[in-house]
Image: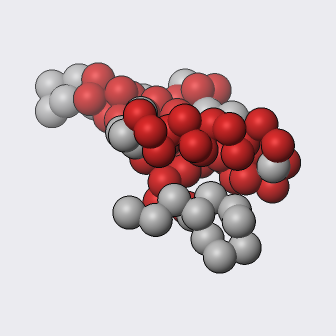
Amino acid sequence: MRIFQESGHVREEPLELHALGDLPVSSALAVERHLKDCQRCKRESIRIAEFIHILRLLAMQTQACDATTPCETSGSRSRLPDRLM
């Protein structure tokens, strides 16, 4: 898998894998070195990590709901960041 674009920035897929902790160590080290110096890739990495975090929160909330105990929608909004509402 190619880590870097021709422009020198990290491709989106490696950033996603890095945020998930699924990037091979040698590739992860290269990405981390690049993120120290590149604000554009660092911002994108943070955006991806926040998105993954939100998905995990939603998955946990969904798993807590089942057929016998339906989720209440009134209190669930407070668990999401304001910018998603």
Residue furthest out toward the bottom:
6
The answer to whether residue 47 is left or right of residue 73 is right
- Point 47% across, 44% down: residue: 27
Q: Vertically, is 65 above or below 38?
A: above
Question: Which quadrant would residue 9 be assigned to in this image?
Answer: bottom right
- Point 26% across, 29% down: residue: 63
| Image position, residue 14 (x, y; %) | 49, 54
| Image position, residue 52 (x, y; %) | 50, 41
Q: How is the image coloured?
A: secondary structure
Count of numbered tags: 0
- Point 59% across, 63% down: residue: 4
Front one among 25 and 66: 25
Q: Vertically, is 65 above or below 54?
A: above
The answer to whether residue 74 is left or right of residue 38 is left
| Image position, residue 24 (x, y; %) | 37, 40
| Image position, residue 49 (x, y; %) | 58, 39
Q: Work out whether residue 71 can be spotted.
A: no
Question: Which quadrant would residue 42 be assigned to in this image?
Answer: top right
- Point 58% across, 26% down: residue: 79
Residue furthest out toward the left:
67
Front one among 33 and 64: 33
Q: Work out whether residue 40 can be spotted.
A: yes
Of the 4 image quadrants, the one containing the N terminus is: bottom left
